[in-house]
Image (spheres, helix red, strand yellow):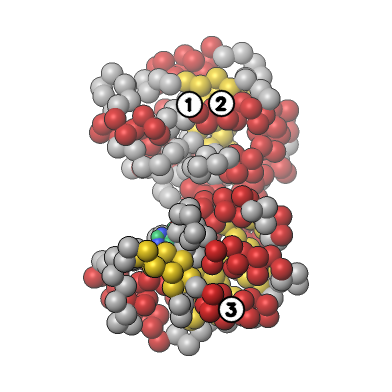
Amino acid sequence: MRYLSRINRKSLCGTALLRLDFNTEDDWRMRAVLPTIRFLLRHSSKIVIISHRGRPQPRLIRANGRIVGANKKLSLRKDGLRLQKLLGRKIRFVASLNFAAVRKAVNGSPRGSIVLLENLRFWKGEKANDAKFAKKLAALADYYVNDAFAVSHRANASVVAITRFLPSYAGLELEKEIEFLGNVMHHPRHPLVFVIGGAKASDKLEIMKYFENKADWFLLGGAAANTILALKGMDMKKSLMDKDKKNLKRLRGILGYKSVLLPVDLKWSDGMALDIGQKTVGTYRKKIKGAKTIIWSGPMGLFEKRGFGTGNLAMARAIANNRRAFKLTGGGETVMFLKKHRLDKKFSFISTGGGAMLDFLAGKKLPGIGALNKHG
Ligand code: ADP
Ligand code: MG
């Protein structure tokens, strides 16, 4: 692995192709990579930023490259304006999806400029990890930098295939992720308390298997808790949970874990469990108090809905108040919530990844990092 911070600055003088992840409603992921952009501004001649947003449907893109329907909301134009404000530098947004036009725009932009391309997922090749598409991207620059940890668990063209065609480096943020997450993974202090919530129930529950022998306690909320409660036979009505039979079969093993704590009271609305209750918070808080390592992924409830953020806030405060533990969190919504309540600074490390953080901690090989190791 070649780290951007450690290589000879002279080899950075050409055009950089910088893969970032802007995929949050607010700008926290963007802020996390500003040092990388500033670093490249000092050492490169030009920066071409590539990123994605949401899950657009490439087949809805017209042959003439016009973006229609739901995809319109997923354009990166607004991200360009946001970044421009944060950096205080002009960002040249290239709206075209035609590569000849994109190349012209990049080549025609002056030295020192920052170019932002349109949402990568508007192109079919991105998700398919298509080598032809990666080659087209590669032709825009002299070297590639991955500073998009949050998408490094996906084998996408701009994350994996691209490394075959350009000298490739790990960005400053990615370097920090590898260092901090690596530490938690290899030398966690016990008791280790793993707080799991959020909407992607099976993704997060799946990870528990890797932590069965590592975590002293799992504290469950959100859709993960709903799913397990339903498996235990509780009527969860219309609550958000995983209903896929195959997934549920795989998750059954979790019912046998002695280290799992589930909500004992829930706040309901219209047949849906949307937050954990006071009693649950009380029990969870005790475990958090005694912890020496705390990993938190996914909010405890639908905090965006008025009146349903109390349980989540109480958990956030309890974690923040444990001064001796190593406190790690990550993921789009969890971090957005912490920033809003100004509790983010109380954490030892905030990972820009959600799924990527969990995969890394579980010891899974992330395709993006693997590609940098192989070709970087
Ligand atoms: P993160 O991005 O932090 O990793 P996820 O993407 O898995 O977390 O899920 C975040 C979302 O989960 C939040 O928008 C939150 O509102 C939602 N959520 C949490 N608990 C519930 C629940 N009980 N019912 C519905 N939505 C929930
Ligand atoms: Mg999320």
- Residue visible at 28% across and 70% down? 237
Q: Amino acid at mark 3?
A: Gly
- Residue visible at 71% across and 55% down? 345
* Left or right position of 136 against 310: left
Instruction: Answer few, some or many: residues within 10 Å of disc 1's Cα (few below 14, many 20 plus, some between 14 and 19).
Output: some
Residue that numbered label 2 is attached to: 81
* Left or right position of 283 against 293: left
Instruction: Answer few, some or many: residues within 10 Å of disc 2's Cα (few below 14, many 20 plus, some between 14 and 19).
Output: some
* Left or right position of 322 against 227: right
C-alpha distance separating marks 1 and 2: 7 Å
Residue 349 visible from this viewpoint: yes
Q: Amino acid at mark 1?
A: Arg
Check if mark 1's residue and mark 2's residue have beta carbons within 8 Å.
Answer: yes
Q: Is the CB of mark 1 within 8 Å of ligand 2?
A: no
Q: Nearer the viewer, mark 2 or mark 3?
A: 3
What x and y, as percent, mark residue 373?
A: 55, 51
